[in-house]
Image: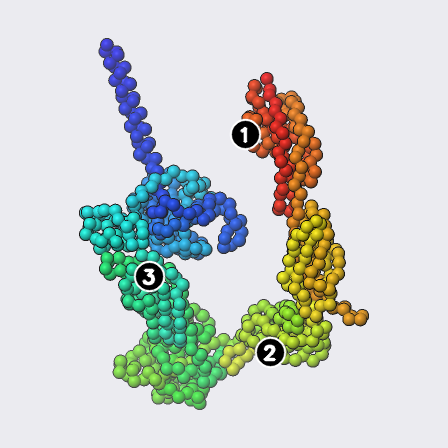
Amino acid sequence: MKKRNLSLNIIFILTFIFTCSFSLKTINAQSYRYPLEDTKAHVTSPYGWRIHPIYGTKKFHAGVDLVCDSKYILAAKTGTVIETGYDSGRGNYVILQHSDNKDRSTYMHMSSIYVKKNQSIKQGQIIGYMGATGAATGVHLHFQVNKAPNYSSTAEVNPNKLKYTYNKNHTHVYNKYGVQDTKKHPHVLIGKCICGKLAKTTASTEKKYGLAKGCKKCLPVITSKYKAKTTSKSMKVKWSKVKNANSYKYYLYSVPKEYATFFPTLSGSTTKNEVTFTNLLPGEYKVFIQAIDSKYGTKSSASAQTVFYVDLPKYTPKKSIIADNKIYSLFEVSSSWKYSENICKRLGGHLAILSNSTRNKSVINMIKKYGKKDYYFIGATDEKKQGTFKWVDGTKFSYKAFAKGQPSDEYKDRPYIREDYLAIDTNKNYGWNDLSNFSTAEKKASTANKGFILQTDIPKAPAAPNIRLEQQGADNIIISWNKVNANKYLVYYSASENGKYTKLGETTSTNMTAKKLKFGQTYYFKVIGYATKFEFSAKGKYSGVKNIQIKPSNITALSIKDSPGSNVNIKYNKSYNATAYEVYRSTVKDRNYKKIGVTNKDNFTDKVKKDKFYYYKIRPYYKNQNTIIYGNYSYAVCIKYIKKPSTVKGIKITKGKNYAVKIKYSKSSYAKGYQIYRSNYKDKKFKRIATTSKLSYIDKSKKKKNKPYYYKVRAYNKIENVTSYGNYSKVKGAKFK
């Protein structure tokens, strides 16, 4: 009896251990939560190889792209955020290391990220908002899972094949940081949100709106396609009104950091769907708009960033000179030292750096002769020590703001230059002055009496451009060329290669059109570039001379259509100046064309055997007595005929040694090859086991005794990338005993 009880106890203990072990495994094997609120998400791009929609190349897609109405992104598993960030491919992204350490999940292209690195995340917690940042063609979520321990970039896991859990009532439960607000709303009911989705609400809130004060509201993100009008110092931004929003918060960020003293540059709120920013420095700016519903204390995610460009006014120097192999330009622009420096950067230079007598004398003489202001801002000098500096006219000037080792203009980045408001003072014998030491009243009084000196490099002679000629229409020629280091180009033409060239025109672009040229005449063209800076310019080299004859214009609207019998109809628009048209045909797209006819009409009928692909080209020509002028060949058009192979007949099965089976069959008309299929059932579950161009095939795969093997054959015809299949043959079987 005791032995029996002992045995029962052992069995009970083992059963308990096994049950606990199984339970722990069940708990640890955490299932995936679907990463979106809407369980009916549409897969726009599945897992696997594909042609990338942006780059146009074959790439492995390591996840799935999902699109649905609800844009909140949820954590698929419990874990820790190991990385957040932005790059040009993934856009805004989050990588979550799962707590079971079996895999990690990645979420890409977000418009907003609601979590931060090292933050603990619960399954189903909102981690971001769907967007179209990075390399994306539209708003969607790229979701992928990478397996431990290597976390291969190929992902190894097809997210579409994972088993997901769904919580249909999971909607606007979380706040911006993924923390549940159930304590604030003790009487939570399920209702309809104003957007039509299920939402958390309270009994005291109107069911019509479905949201209580403080709950996350489903406001749409404002489109990033703002409309903006910019002037030299202002920018007006408009956006579409957002339903249910009664105000908007705006943020303006200056892109180049040196243009702004704090971030954001400007911010505020408005009840209108537009805002005007004034007194902006030239440069690039990012604008963010956020929709607010003050009735329920809710707001949308900030819109995706949009960059606007505030350009410079057209500043022209009063005078420019060359000194010490640099250009120095005098500007009578009333502005601050900072704004003057920004203008200089946008004009391709910097505030003048005066460091030797040649520069000093030349610049001072220019100011004396042409300047009308009291002060002209400059950058700094390359003096190597602090103390008393001696101006070229003998005036001593004590200045302590220069750091020792101040770099010269040879250092283009000038990392130690300070914004010290240095200026040449015309009232103090053209000595230096530091306007930062002025009182507020003095600064204000002297605002209108300031200019600045710009320093730029002397332009270099541009390289010779490469030109291309193309006839357009009846008598126009488009001359185009590659861009070289020039800011204007002169185009010349002639009726003979060694004759006199006439100036066709001048342009800042890289193309020009010569119009109303004489039919049959050959014209010669050449182009030269000039690099200019104010009144100084450097002449480049002429391009090589190229010629083109005015001939019948190119064929357009070429089309091809199948007709009854053996006919093929070709149509096209007539060419300017053409008297007739040659018709060419080939069975290969890019070679072996043969002339098959001539016509003076805008159509042609060809007779063919309809069992191939046929390509056609048209060439117009002009003929007058002994003169023939040919136009260009048209692009190729194709009509595709492919015969369906006949059904394979005469199939025979022969058993050989080592369980080999030989399948023989008769030749099928129009067949380029044959596909062999096999199954263990006579009328289902056939799989292709081979493709061959021969009339027999030996199946040498290992087979089981007393099990039937059935075979059938199908012929196919293939031309280029088009395949036509015949009907399957009769089924034949074999069995090994």
If the image is split into quadrants, where does the N terminus sit? top left
- Residue at 40% in and 39% down: 162
Near-viewer residue (361 or 124): 124
Residue at the image point whose x is 71% and y is 68% from the top: 578
Q: Residue furthest top?
A: 1
State the SS at label 2: strand
Residue at 36% in and 44% down: 39
Q: Is residue 477 above or below residue 639?
A: below
Which residue type does callout 3 highlight?
Val
Image location of residue 493, percent across then percent down:
66, 76
Left or right of residue 253, residue 512 in this image? right
Q: Residue furthest bottom?
A: 369
Q: Which residue is identified by label 3?
A: 242
State the separation of the CA atoms marked 3 and 2: 51 Å
Q: What is the quadrant of residue 597 in the picture? A: bottom right
Q: Amino acid at mark 2?
A: Gly
Can residue 541 be seen at all in this image of the molecule? Answer: no
Label 3: few (<14), some (14–19) or many (≥20) C-alpha neighbours in 10 Å? many
Q: Earlier in the sequence, mark 3 or mark 1?
A: 3
Task: Determine the CA span between mark 3 and mark 1.
Answer: 58 Å
**What is the CA distance from the residue labelled 2 to the residue labelled 1?**
76 Å
- Disc 3 element: loop
- Where residue 451 appears, as percent x and y from the top left, is 39, 82
Residue tagged by mark 2?
A: 505
Residue 684: mark in rendering:
1
Which tag, 2 or 1, sits closer to the chain's start? Answer: 2
